[in-house]
Amino acid sequence: MATHAGGLTLGGLVRAFGERRVLDGLDLTIAPGEFVALIGRSGSGKSTLLRVLAGIDHEVTSFERLNAPGKVSVVFQDARLLPWKRVLDNVILGLTGPDARERGRTALDEVGLAGRERAWPVELSGGEQQRVALARSLVRDPELLLADEPFGALDALTRLRMHALLRRLCERHRPAVLLVTHDVDEAIALADRVAVLEDGRIAADLPVDLPTPRTPGSPAYADLRDRLLTLLGVDTGELALATDDRATERRATEGEER
Ligand SMILES: Nc1ncnc2c1ncn2[C@@H]1O[C@H](COP(=O)(O)OP(=O)(O)OP(=O)(O)O)[C@@H](O)[C@H]1O
């Protein structure tokens, strides 16, 4: 499979809504094939950044440097499939060339949906629809994959399966990836680096130097998780107490049930 030359270099990006600079001189670099997770408090501008990079938001106030690859794919929280087109036709939407259908079939096979080419989107579960959205992105062989909370609407088990799938696909296709997520564990599970957006800039950028699969529980994992949560303004001491409270509550309930 192709390893792409195109990474992302972004310097001094400003995006204001009226007087308010949501992105305020933001710098971000993603090397070819690198997977960066972007976290930040609600309203910090994560989706705004993604929309700018995806070319959906054209009203960039200014930037100093922008070097983005030509082939960019985007995945959102909702799969955004066309309900009147079958699964395969959704995957190859807009693709031309005699091998488009074959490429679409291969992509569906890669996301575990071989045999569902002729299904209608409505016949698929939420997780399956998101697999179709991934296939639609990857069939375009993107140099940059932008993902905005792509697993946010899925149940915990499906989300874990999708993590494994996305890692596999990224290892094979090697696009540069920018994944927006609220979930610190998702960021650690998937990314090479985690960037924290605050006050319109990347306030911290931490490498994830953990062996894979990254299972919570190791001291290094816990340390990174704590650092990221602290950067997000979460009091990890309070969080531990809340977890203890829940465990105590659970033990009490289990005790009652016995
Ligand atoms: N079209 C718009 N007009 C005015 N303000 C906007 C517009 N789009 C976004 N904003 C503002 O920009 C800020 C950043 O929004 P954005 O959706 O990028 O945040 P976010 O970090 O993705 O938030 P969340 O984690 O809650 O999804 C918010 O205060 C939002 O109100």
Image: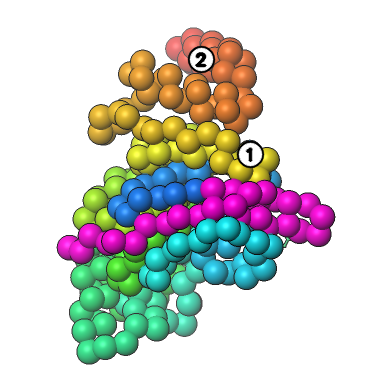
- Dot 2: element: helix
Q: How crowded is the residue under tag 2: few (<14 C-alpha within 10 Å), some, or many (20+)?
A: few
Of all residues, the one furthest to the left in this rendering is 1
Looking at the image, which residue is at 23% across and 76% down? Answer: 103
Of discs 1 and 2, which sits in the foreground? Answer: 1
Looking at the image, which residue is at 50% across and 69% down? Answer: 80
Give the tally of numbered discs.
2
Q: Is residue 145 magenta?
A: no
Q: How crowded is the residue under tag 1: few (<14 C-alpha within 10 Å), some, or many (20+)?
A: many
The amino acid type, in three-letter code, at marker 1 is Glu
Q: Is residue 121 visible?
A: yes
Query: Most prominent secondary structure in the magenta stretch?
Result: strand
Q: Is residue 15 magenta?
A: yes
Start and end of the magenta stretch? 1-27
Indicate which disc, 1 or 2, sits on the residue closer to the N terminus: 1
Looking at the image, which residue is at 26% across and 88% down? Answer: 97
Viewer-proximal residue among 169 and 173? 173
Real-space Cα separation, disc 1 to disc 2, in angstroms = 33 Å
Q: Is residue 198 left or right of residue 212?
A: right
| Mark identifier at residue 247 | 2
Q: Is residue 58 left or right of residue 222?
A: right
Percent x, y for residue 10? 51, 55
Percent x, y for residue 104? 27, 75
Q: Which residue is mark 1?
A: 198
Q: Is residue 215 above or below residue 11?
A: above
Viewer-proximal residue among 118 and 89? 89
Which color scheme did the rendering employ for the protein?
Answer: rainbow
Q: Quadrant of residue 57?
A: bottom right
